[in-house]
């Protein structure tokens, strides 16, 4: 009797796990495959001074996938101005959460694998303006307002590039 219950329990767990896998795979396929398709079937593509990336969620996760687009202005491998990056978290209902990041030459360290060691990021609201309702955003914006204002045209350009490449309305 006990072995029979254990067998049914294990079969039930296996079926639930299989169903969860099917739901996850369907979610990833329908939400992220169109964006990968727009990049020619690959998750990374570079064109027109931008690098585009599609990061589907990790296996069995629904929360950590995103679209990423980055602009890099270089002069002798060292950025001469702010580098703008945009992270887009698409949702199944069609809306997107968006954050913009501005890296400066001061935050760039060529001795650490040519990466930015810090950046200033802001979540954007539905009007594509800094969402100052969150305390952390308001603090970052007030501290680096000049940096964001100085690079805002580039932010608008990268948003337009993302909209064109992925056929989304941000």
Image (spheres, helix red, strand yellow):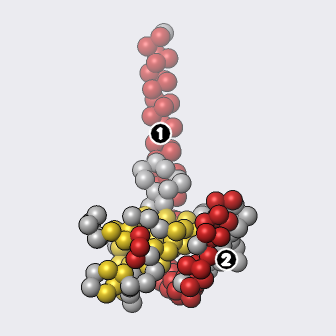
Which label number is shown at residue 45?
none
**Viewed as shown, does residue 74 lie left or right of 20?**
left
Would you name the residue on which mark 1 appears? 17
Q: Quadrant of residue 53?
A: bottom left
Q: Nearer the viewer, residue 121 or 127?
A: 121
| x 45%, y 73%: residue | 103
View extreme (top): residue? 1
View extreme (right): residue? 133
The image position of residue 156, as x and y in percent, is 57, 85
Q: Nearer the viewer, residue 10 or 72?
A: 72
Q: Quadrant of residue 96?
A: bottom right
Question: Which SS class for mark 2?
Answer: loop
Q: Is residue 149 above or below residue 138?
A: below
Q: Nearer the viewer, residue 17 or 72?
A: 72
Which label number is shown at residue 129?
2
One can see residue 29 in this view: no
| x 48%, y 31%: residue | 13
């Amino acid at each position: 009797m006990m072995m029979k219950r254990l067998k049914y329990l294990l079969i039930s767990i296996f079926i639930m796990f299989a169903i969860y896998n099917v739901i996850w795979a369907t979610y990833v396929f329908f939400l992220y495959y169109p964006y990968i398709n727009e990049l020619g079937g690959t998750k990374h593509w570079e064109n027109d001074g931008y690098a585009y990336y599609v990061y589907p969620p990790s296996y069995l996760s629904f929360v950590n996938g995103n679209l990423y687009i980055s602009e890099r202005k270089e002069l002798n491998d060292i950025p001469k101005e702010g580098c703008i990056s945009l992270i887009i978290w698409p949702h199944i209902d069609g809306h997107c959460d968006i954050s913009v990041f501005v890296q400066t030459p001061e935050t760039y360290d060529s001795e650490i694998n040519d990466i930015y060691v810090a950046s200033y990021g802001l979540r954007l609201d539905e009007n594509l303006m800094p969402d100052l309702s969150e305390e952390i955003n308001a603090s970052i914006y007030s501290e680096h307002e000049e940096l964001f204002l100085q690079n805002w045209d580039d932010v608008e350009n990268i948003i337009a590039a993302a909209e064109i490449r992925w056929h989304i309305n941000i």
